[in-house]
Amino acid sequence: MKKTIKFSINGTKVQQEVLPAYLLIDVIRDGLGLRGTKPGCLEGECGACTVLIDGLAVNSCLYLAVNADGKEVTTIEGLISGPDFSLDPVQQAMVDFGAVQCGFCTSGMVMSIKGFYDECVSAQIQPNREQIKKGLEGNLCRCTGYKKIIDAVESLFEEA
Ligand code: FES
Ligand code: FES
């Protein structure tokens, strides 16, 4: 039997009818039409589907939609702000460091970086390069562009 769930997505309150087995990635992409969240492996291995739930990075391909009830979900679309579509500093750093190749991993990578960065800032941690790699180990880039991605993340902490 379907259940009504209410949650916030990118600051907007929404309501969806979901079956118990529905996955959050499907509600985001098909129910709400937000296609920036990418389906990759669909088994929790690649991180392409990463979104933030109450500020924490989560694989939306493994997350039951019913568990999003009452929560705040942020997708890659939610990082753009203002009438001039300003990029989030994480997105800007990825651009500045040339850390995007085919782009398939990028939205999930950006969301994981955002979650990691915000967690570090709130805990007043200045991670070193190894800690950054560890923080992002759930995200795979099949173009193997890791060096520039890590450079981009390091720059965020240098500016903080
Ligand atoms: S699509 Fe979710 S982890 Fe790969
Ligand atoms: S940029 Fe192609 S998979 Fe990462």
Image (cartoon, grey):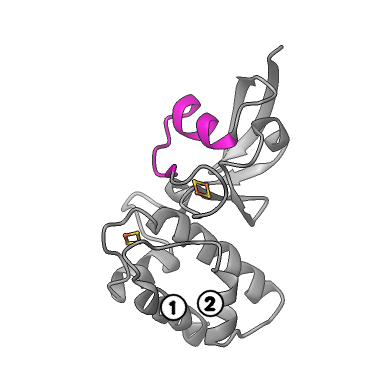
Residue at 58% x, 35% y: name it: 24
Residue at 47% x, 84% y: name it: 159
The image position of residue 32, as x and y in percent, is: 48, 29
Q: Nearer the viewer, residue 139 or 88?
A: 139
Three-letter code, disc 1 = Ile
Q: Is mark 1 within 8 Å of ligand 2?
A: no
The image position of residue 127, as x and y in percent, is: 60, 84
Whether residue 117 is visible to the viewer of this picture, yes or no, is no
Three-letter code, disc 2 = Lys
Whether residue 133 appears in magenta in the rendering, the answer is no
Whether residue 38 appears in magenta in the rendering, the answer is yes
For the residue labelled by badge 2, is the local secondary structure a helix, a strand or a loop?
Answer: helix
The residue that label 2 is drawn on is 133
The image position of residue 151, as x and y in percent, is: 40, 81
Q: Residues within 10 Å of mark 1 (few under 14, many from 20)?
A: some
Q: Is residue 112 toward the left or the right of residue 15 in the image?
A: left
Q: Is residue 115 above or below residue 121?
A: above
Look at the image and tell me in which quarter the N terminus lies: top right
Residue at 68% x, 25% y: name it: 5
Circles 1, 2 touching at the beta carbon (< 8 Å): yes
Whether residue 26 is visible to the viewer of this picture, yes or no, is yes
The quadrant holding residue 150 is: bottom left
For the residue labelled by badge 1, is the local secondary structure a helix, a strand or a loop?
Answer: helix
The residue that label 1 is drawn on is 150
The magenta segment is 24-39
